[in-house]
Amino acid sequence: MENTNLHSPEYLETALPLFCKAVCKLPVEAHARLTRVWSRLGAARIRRLMETFQQLITFTIISNEYDAETLVNDDETVVAATKCLKLVFYASVLGGDLDVGHNEDSDDSDSDDDEITLQELLGEERLYRRGPRVDLLERELGARTLDVRRPVVPFEDFVNESVNEVVEMDKDFTFYKVDADSKFSFQSCPFILNAVTKSQGLYYDNRIRMYSERRITALYSMAQGQQPNPYLKLKVRREHIIDDALVRLEMISMENPSDLKKQLFVEFEGEQGVDEGGVSKEFFQLVLEEIFNPDIGMFTYDQETRSFWFNSSSLENEAQYSLIGIVLGLAIYNNCILDVHFPMVVYRKLMGKKGTFQDLADSHPVLYQSLKQLLDYSGNVEEDIVTSFQISGTDLFGNPITHDLKEQGEGIPVTNHNKQEFVDMYTDYILNKSVERQFKAFKKGFLMVTNESPLKYLFRPEEVELLICGSRNLDFKALEETTDYDGGYSKDCQVVKDFWETIHSFGEDQKRQFLQFTTGSDRAPVGGLGKLKMIIAKNGADTDRLPTSHTCFNALLLPEYSSKEKLKERLLKAITYAKGFGML
């Protein structure tokens, strides 16, 4: 029986908060039972439940004031409603397009030795708990957020912007990592947080780990009488960037993998750039350009999807693939945006799911359509299509090769009865088995950096892509509104007005070139360009010199050009030919 009065506005301040608090006192087994009941209610009623609890949360927040002393985490009504919303969220998951199978083998390597660690000696062991966090409700239900492709109610509808505006993420992070048993953290209900807020929590986690590694290094150095090395330092030559990075990172990963969790500091041999962020950005970019070069053959490029996939015929060893995994992990860890073009299935596999037929639509659309037509075909498959459990392809040099999906597959025809098995085995081979060696090394490198972070718990695959690649949506109006000025410039200066009119007149490629020139990346950070603090500083009077930039500070040094035409000509030349950290 359902009491429909709980949805009424007049009960918002009285009965509904009490109901939420009562539900919170139930054991996890009862929460799971209630979630399963709600999952069978249908889309309209699940959405109504979601909207009811969201309304209570929003109403309570806007009716109160919160600050660093009065935290929203301590508001019993908001906390209780959020915990009830969690049950609705998992009801939406259970009622959606669920796949609890097709899981990758776990690569988490938890340490079970009894030796006391230096972090325990420092009293920081609670901040660095090994192994993945376990959500008791998920375990009871036997389903995770990662297991659903399309929930009953879209994930985005569970995000509450009012919560995101008032939550103090530094305090919330402490509750999440240290005081989880006594304090409520919104990171324990990550569905209610947007990607920007969650990335702040990840930022605190990364920075505290970096700080801890510095302390540990300093203590070890004092004990051994050596000079401390608190950073992950990479000195590379531009012309040998892959070899230098591979040798250094491979040595670190074998001798002391925890060094990967130090703050990255890159130096290009023979150049005077000091790495305060910008040099690292260019390092990442150059490594990616080299490693994704089609001539190397590590990845194949699909012109239709504009994305890369692992080359199953690659002759490169696992260390090269581990390197690109480490680079992706370091980019997240050091808050850098990368120009990476992977299909979504790569991020799903990194999070623990195998590739399935639905993933082919994104990664191999031509093959997907072909196999879908086979599944939908109502005629006699064996006689009309005439294919077997042997598939064909080409190797690295373009030579034809075959592979039996089953033993002696050439002699096993595909029929109406076994066509689904054929499609499943074909998909598993393309997305999993054929690239198992390459992907396993890639994932190993990624986990070397991220295995102890809350990344897997807080973020969905599409949000991990956003963390690594940034947003493809470039809103330069938002960038204009948040840009600061220095050296005598202001938003009312004529040269600044000319600059923005020029930028807004650029095409998409030119805008990306400008962003690359100024920030070291052609993508927007999580939250969009409005989150990017760019500075435009005056760099002298009218001159023929080109504009310059400090990518580590997102700073554009702009001379006070005499005309808009000259500004555009000089700026276009600068963004087209700029590269390197030498002296100008």
Image: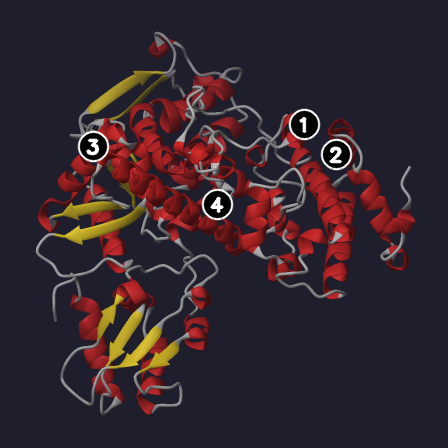
Left or right, 380 with respect to 326, comes to right
Q: Which residue is mark 2?
A: 35
4 vs 1, front mark: 1
Name which residue type carries label 4.
Glu
Question: Residue 388: x percent and y percent?
Answer: 38, 16
> For numbered disc 2, what is the local secondary structure?
helix
Q: Which marked residue is nearer to the observer: mark 3 or mark 1?
A: 3
What's under tag 2, amino acid-wise? Thr
Q: Residue at x 39, y 41 (%)?
A: 343
Q: Is residue 466 left or right of residue 398?
A: right
Separation of marks 3 and 4 at Cα, in angstroms: 32 Å
Relative height, residue 91 to residue 522 (above, below) = above
Q: Which mark is residue 141?
A: 1
Q: Amino acid at mark 1?
A: Leu
SS under mark 4? helix
Viewer-nearest of labels 3 and 4? 3
Residue that numbered label 4 is attached to: 462
Q: Position of residue 447 (x, y in %)?
A: 38, 33
For the rendered model, the colour scheme is secondary structure
